[in-house]
Image (tube, grey):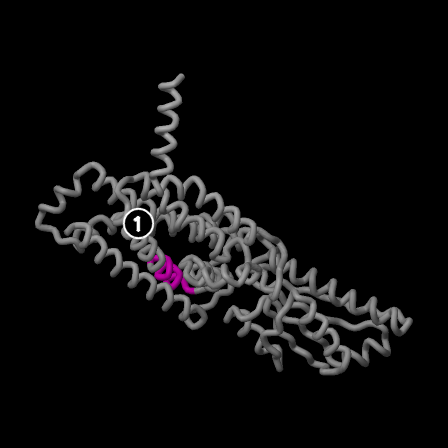
Amino acid sequence: MKRLRGFIIKEFYHIFRDYRTMVILFGLPVVQVLLFGFVLTNEVKDANIAVLDKSKDAETMNIINKLTSSGYFMLNAVLESEDEVEGVFQEGKVKQVVIFEENFAKTLKNEGRARIQLLADASDPNTAQTLVNYTTAVVNTYLAEKAKSEGKQLLIDVVPKMLYNPAMEASYMFVPGVIAIVLMLISSMITSISIAREKELGTMEVLLVSPLRAGQIIIGKVVPYVFLSFLIAATILLVGRFVFGVPINGPLGLLLAESLLFILLALSLGILVSTVSKTQQTAMLISLFALLLPTILLSGLIFPIENMPLLLQYISHAIPAKYFVIILKNIMIKGTGLESVWFETIVLGGITLFFILLSVLNFKKRLE
């Protein structure tokens, strides 16, 4: 028992002395709890909406004030005509447009009934339905307060229309998300493990004494995975189109080019991970927790970013998958072209160049 006790104490010393083990044991659970605690919520707050007020009377102003003061909505744009509706949706500025009919107050007073139309961006069906429900609840609360103060029962018909996904198919949301997750996981993890395996087995030494330069070694390692990842992306698109019925309304060539750009970005991250990993296990852990987890939680593919705390919203700007998901939804579901996703494309291109340069420089240092 004395020897066993000494052996157990020794193991505790080994664990406490290894800072990486301590980070995994205590740091990761805390980070995961905080992330899931703040991110996992169905509540929608401060959603950007636009208003098309054809009446511009006291009643419509009161309802608009009710909506913006509810905490659920933020007024992002005031539209002058229905021709502007498609533009604000394609630019991604708003999640919902509230349209008041002409002579709203007059109709409500004379006929006791008026109409509000809601146009919702149903490329994210859960958020669209939630916003419609919130708007209906705010309007009903307004009517209840008005009936209490004036002693007259009135009715406002809230008529929703789901754009881009009228059938409210969940696949419209998860197929673009799956593409982003799979490409990030496979491209980064497999590349990092492949290079880490060379280092772990000692075969990297053979490459170092070969006539190949550092850049050529990286290109030789990456090219097969670019090809395989591109085939995987095409396969997912085909499955999404013909099995789940997710449309590809925009230019197919642009969609494939954007996918290739994201693959290159993920591969550059995989190379960077491999340069700081001595073993395959370390490379796998870093890829899973530093790349995959933020991709799932902070990219907006499952949980709306505007619902997150402000700090996490700022962090989400550094998540490449966030921009890729926006690109996929715009091209596939909304049918837009480069004019609507040029900013996200530039951001992805800049991040890709940064990580490629950083990976090559870091790889050269490791070789030296």
Q: Amino acid at mark 1?
A: Val
Q: Residue furthest right?
A: 151
Q: Which residue is mark 1?
A: 273
The residue shown at (33%, 66%) is 350
Image quarter where the N terminus lies is: top left
The magenta segment: 251-260
Percent x, y of residue 316: 46, 60
The residue shown at (52%, 49%) is 244
Percent x, y of residue 357: 25, 61
Q: Compared with residue 77, is residue 96 higher up or lower down, i.e. above or below?
A: above
Element under label 1?
helix
Image-quadrant location for residue 14: top left
Percent x, y of residue 52: 65, 77
Label 1 CA crowd tier, 10 Å (few <14, some 14–19, many 20+): many
Image-quadrant location for residue 338: bottom left
Horizontal relation, residue 224 to residue 87: left or right: left
Residue 255 forms part of the magenta stretch: yes
Q: Compared with residue 112, is residue 305 higher up or lower down, i.e. above or below?
A: above
Q: Compared with residue 222, is residue 131 higher up or lower down, i.e. above or below?
A: below
Image-quadrant location for residue 256: bottom left
**Visible residue check, residue 205:** yes
The residue shown at (44%, 52%) is 294
Magenta span dominant secondary structure: helix
Q: Residue furthest front?
A: 2
The residue shown at (21%, 58%) is 361
Residue 5 forms part of the magenta stretch: no
**Visible residue check, residue 241:** no
Q: Residue furthest top?
A: 1
Percent x, y of residue 174: 51, 51
